Image (tube, rainbow, N blue to C red):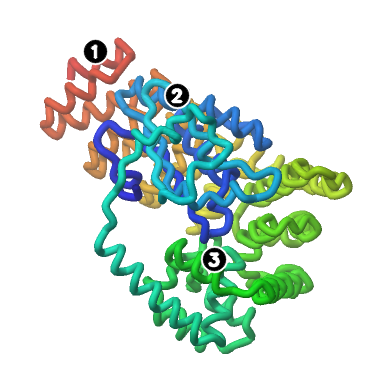
Amino acid sequence: MATLALHPPAGVRVVPFFITARWAGQSDRAAFLETVLTQLSEITGQPLPDVLTESNRQQWFLQLLGEAAQTCSAHGFRLVLLVDGLDEDRGVTRGADGHSIAALLPGRPPPGLKVVVAGRPNPPVPADVSDWHPLRDRRIVRKLKPSQWAVAMRDTAQRELDGLLDSGGLARDLLGLLVVAGGGLSGRDLAELTGEPLGEVERILHTVTGRSFSGHNTQWTCSPDRLFVLAHEELVRTVQRSMRYAEAIEHREKIHAWANSYQRQNWPADTPEYLLRGYLSMLLATGDVGRMRETVTDWRRLDRMLDVSGGDAAAMADIITVQEYIRDQSEPDLAASLHLAFTRHHLTRRNSNIPTNLPAAWVVLENPNRAQALAHSITDPYEQAQALVGVVEALVQAGDLDRAEATAHSINDPYERARAVIGIGEALVQAGDLDRAESAARFITSPYERARALAGVVEALVQAGDLERAESAARFITSPYERARALAG
């Protein structure tokens, strides 16, 4: 599934989502909609509203899915919605407001769309999936043979994990903390939580990394610390089965005390990324409304999130998530809802006067992550598009064409996105990457701008002597004038 997402066949555009239960915030319907809506918006050029409730996100998902399929078909592409790990969906068991990702998938996909899903046979299809849905049709199932390499790695990891659990002490505590936290803790985080020397913690982590544990880079900071998670969902289940109830409570209380210690310090610059990104998912899993409210309305924490991420988009999403959780309770906490609404208004106000050229300055200062986050925090759609175009231009100047192209696709305004993609296409042509330049140009939704971009690619192909491909590319130009000009060349 990862190979299909990263290297799709010719003429296929993939919109992927990988459900990962062992990573906090990557295993429920909210995470799915947030990730997929962004990708569909890029394809269609349809800007998303600044604030979307869960029900609105579902409506936009179905609408944009159909529009994206039409857009891809018009450009000669097939759209594939890829969802991996249906068996790891944690939204199914999250109380009264729990709903599955599977139930969101269209039972009758629009023309031009294929839906590809993967998961283990158990647990079965969630109960909220309609009886007539194709997911309940056994004829669509294709059983895949287990990879011998993967089986060997799994068995090795299982033996190592059993040894760590049986050894007790620090190794068992590390496993319990990672599972209770939902993953995403660094060696330094685990040392603070356990009170043990960092060297002892790292010795255990590094001994089995790649088998029992998997390491990932931090997303918001340039810290050399790796964030660890158990390498497979089956390993998570093994740890959960082996933990006593009192043991899980003890680990959870340690994490709460750890978060409180950073809160008392007013969330300093060295605040662990988990406390800014993953902690809320643990609170949601336990239904701790009081701590949810206290966490997402702490203005000093919001300021620290702004500092490390470069924008308020993540903080705003957290507030909306908690608002929707409270809304779905049998007795909603109205005081908490009012506090959350006031905090959200505060974030909206402070993002209404960001200069549109400021994000590009962060690219020049070699901080593109902050540039993108700051641009996406601008609430006015037109000004946000202008800021993102500036970021793309700065990235092109810096030679980072991969990030420039990804940023260009996140621009919702069709004209501004086309302007950004044309600049990238010109840089790709100069670099001799004509395949990629042609692909980028064909995904411009504005007919006139797409014609201009493709005409430039055709001219470059002619100069390179590839007349057959130049003629093929010219056929995709819908503007009669630009097509005639291209064919004349």
**Circle nearer the N terminus (1, 2):** 2
Looking at this view, is 243 or 380 the one in front? 243
Answer whether residue 299 is visible to the viewer in this image. no
Looking at this view, is 232 or 45 the one in front? 232
**Circle nearer the N terminus (3, 2):** 2
Instruction: Judge the density around disc 3: few (<14), some (14-19), many (≥20) Cα neighbours within 10 Å.
Output: many
Name the side, left or right, on which 123 lies relative to 116: right
Residues at badges 3 and 2 in contact (C-beta under 8 Å)? no
Regarding mark 2 in the picture, which secondary structure is present there? loop
Looking at this view, is 316 or 395 the one in front? 316
Q: Which mark is residue 484?
A: 1
Single out the mark in the foreground, 3 or 2: 2
- At label 3, the amino acid type is Gly
Q: Residue at x 68, y 51 (%)?
A: 315
Q: Which mark is residue 184?
A: 3
**Circle nearer the N terminus (1, 3):** 3
Q: Residue at x 44, y 69 (%)?
A: 215
Above or below: residue 395 compared with residue 192: above
Regarding mark 1 in the picture, which secondary structure is present there? helix
